[in-house]
Amino acid sequence: MSVDATLSFEEAMEKYDPVLGFEVHVELNTKTKMFSSAPNVFGDEPNTNVNEVDLGMPGVLPVVNKTAVESSIKIGLALNCKIAESCRFARKNYFYPDTPKNFQTSQYDEPIAYDGYLDIELEDGTVFRVEIERAHMEEDAGKLTHMGGAAGRIQGADYSLVDYNRSGVPLVEIVTKPIEGAGSRAPELAKAYVAAVREIVKNLGVSDAKMERGNVRCDANVSLRPHGRERFGIRSETKNVNSLRAVEHAVRYEIQRHAAVLDSGEPVIQETRHWHEDTRSTTSGRPKSDADDYRYFPEPDLVPVVASREWVEELRATLPEPPAERRKRLKEAWGYSDLEFRDVVNAGVMDSIEETIAAGASADVARKWWMGEIVGRAKVADVDPSELGVTPQVIVELNKLVEDGKINNKMATQVLDGVLAGEGTPEEIVEKRGLAVVSDDGPLLEAIDAALAAQPDVAEKIRGGKVQAIGAIVGGVMKATRGQADAGRVRELILEKLGVEG
Amino acid sequence: MAAINRDDVAHLARLAHIEMSAEELDRMAVELAVIVDSVKSVSEAAGEDVPATSHPIPLTNVFREDVVGHTFTAEQALSGAPDAYENRFKVPAILDED
């Protein structure tokens, strides 16, 4: 396998202007398939979620899944698309063992949704509008496992195994218009766009949206043209880009590769490229050719889908708040700074914080616990913060214990560890671990006297009005009580003792 | 004569995975041209005001509720397969993966 030449990304950007385009396939999470009543379930035993329709037996009659149509309309609406009053299915003819019928049932010239857009917010807050060409309904293909080749056997020994469980799973393919003007932010925009689509379909509840399971799959088109030229360059289409990070890397790599090809004076070949996560590069698939002659024609076994305006409006009324708007609303409601909010979103604890606030915590308390304590522990445990085992209720209880002066912040983190170790509720753990703050003033006063005696110069400063010096005395008391004292109460007592107004 | 020539037939044959000899291509080019011409007479009957028709029956929205129905067992699914391995269809490797 030859390694393609690349330019540095910076040099490529200096010389060329990238144009992007994406085809994102979304698997719907309906209970059954697009055209058959077989279950749509991931990970079952091979060829058990199939019936005669999925296997392309002769003489069978496909019937459209109503829920899949509704999900498709919802996706169209969420992408600000127009919904076709009437649309048809079409046969896309090709021979490949992933499709037992020798055609994929898709939509061709009449997609159910068209002419939309999505405003993509980049990390620094820049908003970039991506125009949506269309979103159409189709069915997924079976899964092929290629055997033998990787083991270095002779060509003739190779074969493939086919599982048709995925065959017929409802898909919505979302196609963008050419995306111009992204410049050096093209890789970042690519990632943000796919992330936004994934978030939208997840938020709509129409897809499980797990990229690692192939619920959301991206084909990335890249072409370059010299700066100032209007006509597009020749594009490549990189398939199999199945993580957000890979989308960013693949677009970046293809820009660098195209730039090197163009620099050498050669034309870019219009072809399919395959993304390889291990080498972070693409290899040539096949050139676009006659094989792309799919001879689409209207599917005679399926009658047109007519989406009445009443039906569309009914569905529109069920749409949840768009994720981007929700973020904006929450940020304002919580009063976080841009940076604070971005950290919360990137740490994946926005939902958890929202739930914690709903359970009675303040926005600042919720953020303090999730960002300050839980995110770090989740990282160590290598799980999502929300899956660590801290419920909003635990945080509310912990905070109440601190506010009531029963424990201090340091103890509260120990109580949190206790909760995670399964020792019980925060109250129970305070009890069991004997963590209560020393609230009896007697022992505190003794410790204060000792601390003042140990640092007479500091005591003098405080008496003289330099109240900020009190930290050293409080620290001494805390040390003496092994952190079990209520620092606020200690401060009050010191000031009282020295006769100084706090 | 219809605009279908020997090259078109060869192209279609390849797309359809049909192996054809030189003689067959020659003969089929002539025969298909006649067929295409015959079909063309339909457009003479339909005026400009008649839209292309894909479905002659005036039916729309024939839907199924999203309720799980019957499935095959893997054994049933594979019962007609020329070859199988570990409950999956076994097919010749097609390296031109897409």
Image (cartoon, rainbow, N blue to C red):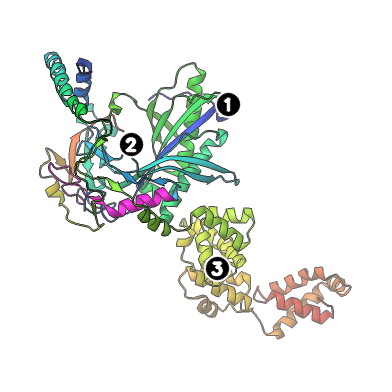
Residue A35 belongs to the span the image colors magenta: no
Mark yes or no: residue A209 visible: no
Residue A292 placed where, x, y %? 30, 28
Query: Which residue is labeled 2 in the image?
Result: A109
Mark 3 residue crowding within 10 angstroms, few (<14) / some (14–19) / many (20+): many
Residues at marks 1 and 3 touching, judged by CB atoms closer than 8 Å: no
Residue B49 x %, y %: 28, 34
* Quadrant location of the C terminus of chain A in the rendered image: bottom right
Q: Left or right of B34: which side holds A201?
A: right
Q: What amino acid is found at the position of numbered circle 1 in the picture?
A: Glu
Q: Chain of mark 1?
A: A
How far apart in space, not on screen, are marks 1 and 2 (Cα)?
A: 40 Å
Q: Residue sitting at 80 percent across and 73 percent down? A: A454
* Residue carrying label 1: A11
How packed mark 1 is, by other alpha carbons closer than 10 Å (few <14, some 14-19, many 20 or more), is few
Q: Is residue A432 left or right of residue B86?
A: right
Q: Name the element at disc 1.
A: helix
Q: Earlier in the sequence, mark 3 or mark 2?
A: 2
Residue A331 falls left or right of residue A290? right
Q: Amino acid at mark 3?
A: Ile
Q: Residue at x 17, y 25 (%)?
A: B41
The magenta span reads: A48-77
Q: Are marks 3 and 2 in contact (CB under 8 Å)?
A: no
Residue tagged by mark 3? A357
Q: Secondary structure at mark 3?
A: helix
